[in-house]
Image: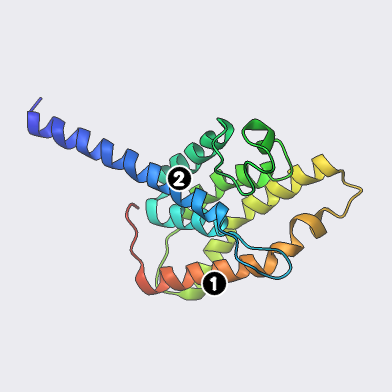
């Protein structure tokens, strides 16, 4: 094979690895920075999960989120409230495990959408993309705390306003700039 072609292949693969690694850093930062919000503090994790799907496309976003979760399983303090609330597999099997696993599906779904300049169309696509996070999260949470407890009051209602804010913000960004890296 031609040396230049091989060099281009290796350079492209190295760039993709770097992009995935930077994506995991963004997810880690988004988990650690808490913004005071009513009724609970807001992190930007779901925003970044959807942004990665939009910006990187389905395959690369999925790889990024999967690596992020794998880093957490290995014990790196990448998740919200780690290491205070535990690290590694113990964190994943806790109350938020379903939400974190939902990141994988949501990043992929966000990457498959055909975005355009229409704010409401993009908002609807982002809303559909974020649903797996909450569906898996609530199912997981219900199995952990018991279905006799008010699962929606613990795992959904406190996050609705923050989620709406993040979806609107990302929809504005997508509608205004539409700068996808991969499709």
Q: CA distance from mark 2 to mark 1?
A: 23 Å
Image quarter where the N terminus lies is top left
SS for tag 2? helix
Q: Would residue 13 appear left or right of 108 to someone viewing this image?
A: left
Query: Are the residues at dot 2 and dot 1 in contact (C-beta closer than 8 Å)?
Result: no
Query: Residue 176: where, in percent of width, then height?
Result: 38, 74
Residue 97's quadrant in the figure? Answer: top right
Residue at screen point 46% across, 58% down: 51
Image position of 102 (left or right of 170): right
Q: Earlier in the sequence, mark 2 or mark 1?
A: 2
Residue 116 vs residue 65, the one in the foreground: 65
Camera-nearest residue between 130 and 13? 13
* Residue drawn at point x = 23 percent, y = 39 percent: 12
The residue lying furthest to the front in this view is 84
At 84% from the left and 44% from the top, the residue drawn is 145
* Residue 96 in the image, given as x and y percentages of width and height: 69, 45
Is any part of residue 112 visible from this angle?
A: no
Q: Which mark is residue 24?
A: 2
54 in relation to 88, above or below = below
Count of number-bearing discs: 2
Mark 2 residue crowding within 10 angstroms, few (<14) / some (14–19) / many (20+): many
Q: Which residue is mark 1?
A: 168
Is 177 positioned to the left or the right of 81 in the image?
left
Residue 27 screen position, x and y as percent: 50, 50
**Which residue ends up furthest to the top in the rendered image?**
1
Where 14 falls versus 149 (above or below)? above
Please tell me whether residue 3 is drawn above or below residue 131 in the rendered image.
Answer: above
| Front residue (pair 170, 128) | 170
- Residue 14 at least partly seen: yes
Residue in the image at 49% along x and 56% along y: 48
């Amino acid at each position: 094979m031609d040396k230049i072609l091989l060099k281009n292949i290796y350079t492209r693969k190295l760039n993709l690895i770097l992009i995935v690694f930077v994506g995991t850093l963004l997810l880690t930062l988004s988990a650690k920075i808490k913004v005071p919000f009513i009724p609970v503090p807001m992190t930007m994790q779901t925003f970044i999960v959807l942004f990665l799907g939009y910006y990187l496309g389905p395959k690369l976003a999925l790889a990024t989120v999967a690596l992020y979760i794998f880093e957490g399983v290995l014990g790196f303090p990448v998740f919200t409230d780690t290491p205070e609330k535990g690290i590694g597999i113990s964190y994943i099997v806790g109350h938020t495990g379903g939400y974190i696993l939902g990141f994988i599906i949501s990043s992929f779904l966000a990457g498959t959408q055909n975005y355009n300049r229409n704010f409401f169309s993009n908002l609807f696509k982002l809303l559909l993309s974020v649903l797996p996070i909450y569906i898996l999260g609530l199912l997981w949470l219900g199995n952990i705390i018991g279905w006799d407890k008010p699962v929606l009051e613990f795992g959904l209602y406190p996050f609705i306003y923050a989620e709406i804010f993040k979806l609107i913000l990302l929809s504005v960004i997508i509608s205004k700039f539409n700068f996808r890296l991969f499709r």
